[in-house]
């Protein structure tokens, strides 16, 4: 018996009408599961990228290191997707935040940057911390000069003691690693406990601290420290001899002589691939982010002490940050030892031709 087409059409319509409510109930759940899976994949993929390229500045758990801002903050999660893409892609002027987009000279594709935005908004930072540690990419802790309660109590007895206390605390956290905990200078920065410096007009000292000195390792601090912190530190510099004469004892600075051992080279290799690889490339062969260090010309013309200074103090006007406040003297020397070990086999890479 042949069923009339009208009846077949009616039955098909009834079936469709019956399915639509069921589909409408199932589809949102499937879409939600697909979206969650997409987010999960993006976060997992970006975690390793974060460990290899971002943790060294922003911390293993996104907590921020030094003057580098934290990423595990509600304020950052609330930023728009477009704004986060812009910051990651183009970087930020007058900071060490580089441009990471390939078209801007970086190493991340548009898809990777999109995934990184999802990572920032969705990441479980406890998992990220564990993964960074698992990969051996946990960055070194910040090194700070310890300011004791006895030191602060002694300063409180002086005229303007509150200002001097703020100056000493600021100096300890930001300056001691380069200029020495006793202000006597180190191999990477000059002495601040200096009669000649105290004879310099205050405006000149303030300008140096605020603006840095181009072509030297002295960076600009005006976007890092508050004006009152800078003023208090400069006041401490001018009254350093008075502070010493008050009986306050600063810890002595111990600077190891630069040496090289197989152990130091191995430690330097490990540290380089935690702190330096993301910009200078695997084994120092360079990347769009930073020049090659595994370079015969650079290694032949740059003494160990100069390499040490560059790493510790950074390079003003470039993306090279100052590592002196985050690495111990041994760490710095191990990096020098590792880079020096490359000299025998380093390729001859000519510097870029300047356009005049």
Image (cartoon, rainbow, N blue to C red):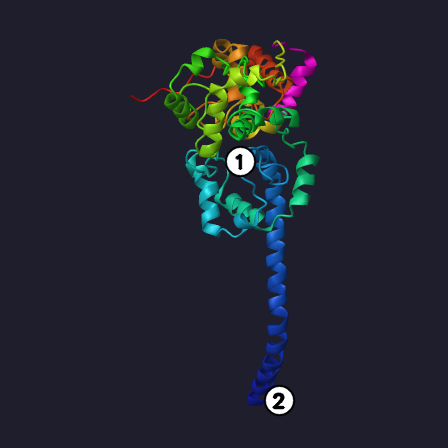
Q: Which mark is residue 178?
A: none
Instruction: Compare residues 274 and 322 and report the one nearer the observer.
Output: 322
Whether residue 288 can be seen here:
no
Asked if residue 271 lies in the magenta stretch, the reply is yes
Using a 10 Å C-alpha cutoff, classify the residue at mark 1 as few (fewer than 14 neighbours), some (14 to 19) or many (20 or more).
some
* SS for callout 1: loop
The quarter in which the N terminus is drawn is bottom right
* SS for callout 2: loop
Residue 109 percent location from the top left of the image: 49, 41
Residue 68 percent location from the top left of the image: 53, 35
In the rendered view, would you say 168 is above or below 133?
Answer: above
Instruction: Compare residues 228 and 80 and report the one nearer the observer.
Output: 228
Residue named by callout 2: 2
Lower position in the chain sequence, tag 2 or tag 1: 2
Image point (59%, 81%), residue name: 17
Instruction: Compare residues 42 and 60 and report the one nearer the observer.
Output: 60
Find residue 162 and report its image quarter: top right
Q: Classify residue 62 as left or right of residue 349.
A: right
Residue 177 percent location from the top left of the image: 57, 21
Whether residue 205 can be seen here:
yes
Residue named by callout 1: 68
Majority secondary structure in the magenta region: helix
Residue 100 percent location from the top left of the image: 48, 37
Label 2, label 1: how far apart the Cα atoms are: 78 Å
Q: Which residue range is magenta in the image?
A: 258-272
């Amino acid at each position: 018996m042949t069923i009339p087409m009208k009846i077949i059409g009616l039955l098909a319509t009834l079936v469709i009408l019956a399915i639509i409510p069921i589909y409408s109930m199932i589809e949102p759940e499937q879409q939600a599961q697909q979206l969650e899976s997409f987010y999960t994949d993006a976060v997992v993929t970006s975690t390793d990228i974060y460990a290899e390229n971002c943790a060294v500045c922003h911390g293993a758990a996104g907590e921020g290191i030094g003057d580098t801002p934290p990423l595990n903050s509600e304020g950052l999660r609330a930023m728009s997707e477009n704004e986060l893409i812009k910051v990651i892609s183009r970087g930020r002027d007058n900071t060490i935040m580089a441009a990471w987009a390939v078209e801007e000279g970086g190493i991340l594709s548009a898809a990777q940057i999109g995934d990184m935005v999802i990572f920032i908004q969705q990441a479980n930072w406890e998992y990220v911390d564990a993964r960074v540690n698992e990969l051996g990419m946990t960055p070194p802790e910040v090194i700070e000069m310890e300011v004791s309660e006895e030191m602060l109590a002694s300063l409180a007895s002086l005229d303007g003691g509150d200002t001097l206390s703020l100056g000493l605390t600021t100096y300890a956290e930001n300056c001691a690693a380069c200029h020495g905990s006793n202000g006597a200078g180190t191999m990477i920065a000059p002495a601040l406990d200096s009669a000649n410096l105290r004879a310099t007009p205050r405006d000149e000292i303030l300008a140096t601290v605020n603006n840095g000195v181009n072509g030297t390792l002295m960076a600009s601090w005006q976007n890092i420290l508050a004006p009152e912190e800078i003023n208090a530190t400069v006041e401490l510099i001018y009254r350093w001899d008075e502070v010493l004469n008050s009986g306050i004892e600063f810890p002595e600075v111990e600077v190891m002589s630069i040496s090289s051992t197989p152990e130091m080279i191995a430690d330097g290799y490990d540290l380089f691939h935690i702190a330096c690889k993301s910009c200078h490339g695997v084994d120092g062969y360079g990347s769009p982010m930073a020049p090659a260090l595994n370079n015969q010309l650079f290694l032949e013309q740059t003494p160990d002490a100069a390499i040490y200074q560059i790493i510790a103090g950074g390079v003003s006007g470039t993306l090279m940050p100052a590592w002196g406040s985050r690495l111990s003297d041994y760490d710095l020397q191990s990096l020098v030892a590792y880079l020096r070990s490359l000299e025998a086999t380093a390729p001859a890479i000519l510097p870029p031709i300047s356009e005049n």
